Image: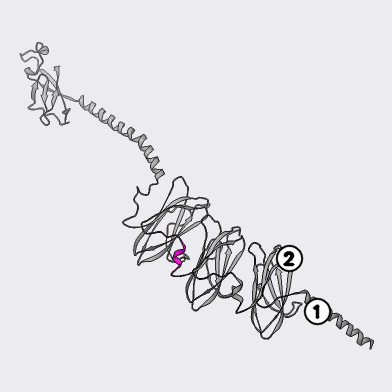
Amino acid sequence: MDRQRLVLGILLVSIFILTGTVSAQDDLVANSPRTDEYLSSGSTNDYVSNLEAGHWTVVTYLDSWYDLEVKITISWDISGLNIIAVSGSGTGNYPSVDFTLNSSSTVYITVSENSIYHDTSGYYDIGIYDDNHVSGIYPSIAANVPRTDEYLYSGSTNYYVSELEAGHWTVVVYLESSDDLEVKITVSSDILGLNIIGVSGSGTGNYPSVDFTLNSNSSVYIAVSENSVYHDTSDYYEIGVYDDSHVSGIYPAIAANVPRTDEYLYSESTNYYVSNLEAGHWTIVTNYDSWYDLEVKITVSLDISGSDIIAVSGSGTGNYPGVDFTLNSSSTVYIAVSENSVYHDTSGYYEIGIYDDSHVPGLLASINPDDWIIIIILAIIFIPICVGGIIGRRSESKGRESYETIAVEAPIHVIPDEYKESVRYDGSETTTVRLPLKCPSCGAEVSFEGIDWVGPLEAKCGFCGGTMRATFERV
C-alpha cells in the first residue's frame, strides 16, 4: 500500500512539473501573430500551438532596424527530440519554415538566436499560418503601384508579397543616385524562398531589377537584400512590380535628339534612363563639365533588368562617354550610366542625349561652354602672335625682294641732268641704271627687253602699268 502511494505521488509530481513547464511556454494561435517579441543574443524563445491537420508555415518577421538572425525548430514533443521541421542548417538567418500535419496535433516551436557569434538581438513578430493566410504577413506590393520611402538597413533583408496575374513581370528597386545602397532581389513562389523564380544578380554588387514570367495567377514573395561587399550600405528606396505596359515609366525618359541636361552622377552610383526609339542607327553621347573629373560607362539593354545587353561603351575602368547601336525595329531601350573610375570616386554634372545620324553632335557641339572660355583666351593670346609673325615674314620677304635689282642700259634721255655731264658719248663709257627684278606693285618679273621708259629714271610695268624707279649707276 505504501509503495502504491509512493508511485502515485511521483506520478502526480511529474504531471505537475510537466504541466508547469508547458504552461511556461507561450501559446501561438493559428493565423494570429504575436508581436513585439524580443530575442536576446545567444538565447531561445519557446512557443506551443494546437493545430488542425493541414499545411502550415511558421514565419518570424524581423524589424530591419535590428540585425537579428534566427533559426526555427518545430517538434512533436516539448523536449525537442522528435523534430518535424527546421528552417535552416548552420548559422545565419532562417526566418520561416513549413510543415504538414496529417491530424490535429500540438507542436512545439523554438526560435533560436543563430548568428555566427551569437551576438545579435532584437524585436520580432511570429505567426503560424495556414495556406489561406500566409500571404498576408508581409507588406503587399500591388501590381504597377510602387511602394515608396522603404528603408533597407545594412546587412538586412526586407520581404514583400504580391498577388499577380499570369504574364511577364518586372520587379524594380529605384534608388536615388545619391544613395550608395546596393541590393539584390530574389523572387520566389513560396514564402520560404525555396522555389526561386527570379534573382537579379549573383555575387555582391547592385542588382536593382529582375523579371520573371507566371503561367497562372500566383502569389510571389520578394526579398530585397542589402548586397554590398562589406554589407555596410543603407538608405531609402522605392519598389514596384510592373507588367510590360507599365515598366518603361519608372525611369526618366530621354526623347530622341533631345538631350537631358544638369544630370548628376555620384561616385560609385548608376543612373538609369528609358527611351522609345524607332528602327535605325543611334548614338548615345554624354558631355560633362571639364571642371569635373567624372568617368562614365554606358550600357544599353533591351530589358529593364539589363540582361539583354545590345551595346556597352567600353570595358574595364576609365571614361567611355559614348556608344552607338542599331535597332532593327522600333524598341524601348534601357540605359545605365555608371561611374567608372578606378577607385569609383568621381562625380559631377553631365548632359546625355540619344541621336540619330542626322543629329549626332559634331566636334564644336561637343565642346563644353567652359572649354570655350579657355579656347577664346588662348586664341586672344596666340592669334596676334601668329599674325605678327606672318606679317613680319612677308615684310622681310618684300624687303629682300626690293633689294634684288638688274642692270640695264639706259637711254640718255632718262638720265637726270645732274648726271649727264659725267656721261661721255664716244662709246668708251656706258651708262647703266638698275631696275627692280620684280614690279613693286604686282610682283611680276620685269622683262629685260622693250622697257618702256616714261621719265627720268622711271619705267612702266608691262603688266600692271605701275611706275618703277631706277637707280643711276656708272660702270
* Residue 89 can be seen in this image: no
* Quarter of the image where one finds residue 334: bottom left
Q: Residues within 10 Å of mark 2 (few under 14, many from 20)?
A: some
Residue type for callout 1: Thr
Q: Nearer the viewer, residue 211 or 204?
A: 211
Q: Can you say which quadrant of the picture contains the C terminus?
A: top left
Residue lying furthest top in this view? 421
The total number of labels drawn is: 2
In the rendered view, would you say 447 is above or below 159? above
- Establish if 290 lies above or below 145: above
Name the outermost residue toward the right: 2
First in sequence, mark 2 or 1: give its number: 1
Q: Is residue 70 left or right of residue 202?
A: right
Helix, strand or loop at disc 2?
Answer: loop
Mark 1: give few (<14), some (14-19) or many (20+) Cα within 10 Å: few
Name the residue nearer the viewer: 374 or 461. 374
Q: Is residue 45 magenta?
A: no
Q: Residue at x 64, y 65 (%)?
A: 63
Residue labelled with disc 2: 42
Q: Which residues are magenta?
A: 242-253
Is residue 379 at least partly visible in the picture? Answer: yes
Q: Quadrant of the N terminus?
A: bottom right
Front residue of 149 and 382: 149
C-alpha gap between disc 2 and disc 1 = 26 Å
The disc at residue 442 is none
Relative horizontal placement of residue 67, taking residue 253 as reference (left or right)? right
Q: Is residue 359 left or right of residue 430?
A: right
Q: Which label was assigned to residue 19?
A: 1
